[in-house]
Amino acid sequence: MLSIDLDRTDIKILNELQKDARLTNVELAQRVNLSPSPCLTRVRALERAGIINRYVALVNPSAVGLGLNVFINITLERQVEKSLQQFQNTIQRFPEIVECYLMTGDADYLLRVVVPDVPALEEFILNGLTRIPGVASIRSSFALKQVKYDTALPLEGGAKRTGKRGATRSEAE
């Protein structure tokens, strides 16, 4: 994985791809005011650097019968590396878990689980989560309504940027 500093053009490319990853290289180049060849070179560099991880289609959960969005706090009996790793390895087997975070605070993990309905959630908890060794407690919260969901990162304010490609901020100024 390469390390590159992002300039304004890189940020524009990333913003456009976050809005629509199906853009052709020609369309992308037009939107960021580059010719196609340099645009493709930049996209490939962003991919090689691991800045662009992958391209995906975002599926509407309700449209495919997965209307229940649940956040589950998991507390383990012991917070030692072996227990944490065992839990993390085990949850990879559950497609219902679409996100998992190791947390600070009261719970060790926060899971986002997507299932069709309450009986499916019950099945998942009773025959899935409760059978994972070392789980001490499980607390669920149902999402009543999704108020905001955005997959695009706010690059304008948080990304490390430079004035020149590959230069550090101080070199560019």
Image (cartoon, rainbow, N blue to C red):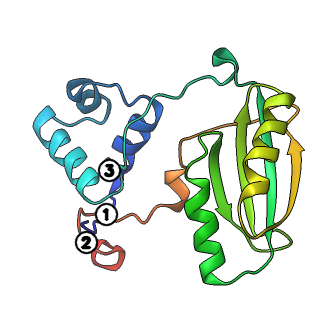
Q: Is residue 86 above or below residue 49?
A: below
Could you tell me the amino acid type at mark 1? Gly
- Residue sitting at x 31%, y 75%: 168
On the image, the x and y values in percent for residue 98 come to: 62, 43
Question: Which of these two is toward me, 129 or 150?
Answer: 129
Dot 1 alpha-carbon crowd within 10 angstroms: few under 14, some 14 to 19, many 20 or more? some
- Alpha carbon of mark 1 to alpha carbon of mark 2: how far? 8 Å
Is 45 on the left-hand or right-hand side of 80?
Answer: left
- Residue sitting at x 88%, y 32%: 144
Q: Which mark is residue 82?
A: none
Question: Which of these two is toward me, 61 or 169?
Answer: 61
On the image, the x and y values in percent for residue 166 come to: 23, 67
Q: Nearer the viewer, mark 3 or mark 1?
A: 3
Q: Nearer the viewer, mark 1 or mark 2?
A: 2
Count of numbered tags:
3
On the image, the x and y values in percent for residue 4 come to: 28, 65
- Residue sitting at x 43%, y 41%: 15
Residue at numbered disc 1: 163
Place residue 82 in its image quadrant.
bottom right
Q: Which mark is residue 10?
A: 3
Could you tell me the amino acid type at mark 2? Ala
* Label pair 1/2, CB-CB below 8 angstroms: yes
Residue at numbered disc 2: 167
Dot 2 alpha-carbon crowd within 10 angstroms: few under 14, some 14 to 19, many 20 or more? some
On the image, the x and y values in percent for residue 79 come to: 73, 81
* Label pair 3/1, CB-CB below 8 angstroms: no
- Alpha carbon of mark 3 to alpha carbon of mark 1: how far? 11 Å
Q: Secondary structure at mark 1?
A: loop
Residue projecting furthest to the bottom? 80
Place residue 36 in its image quadrant.
top left
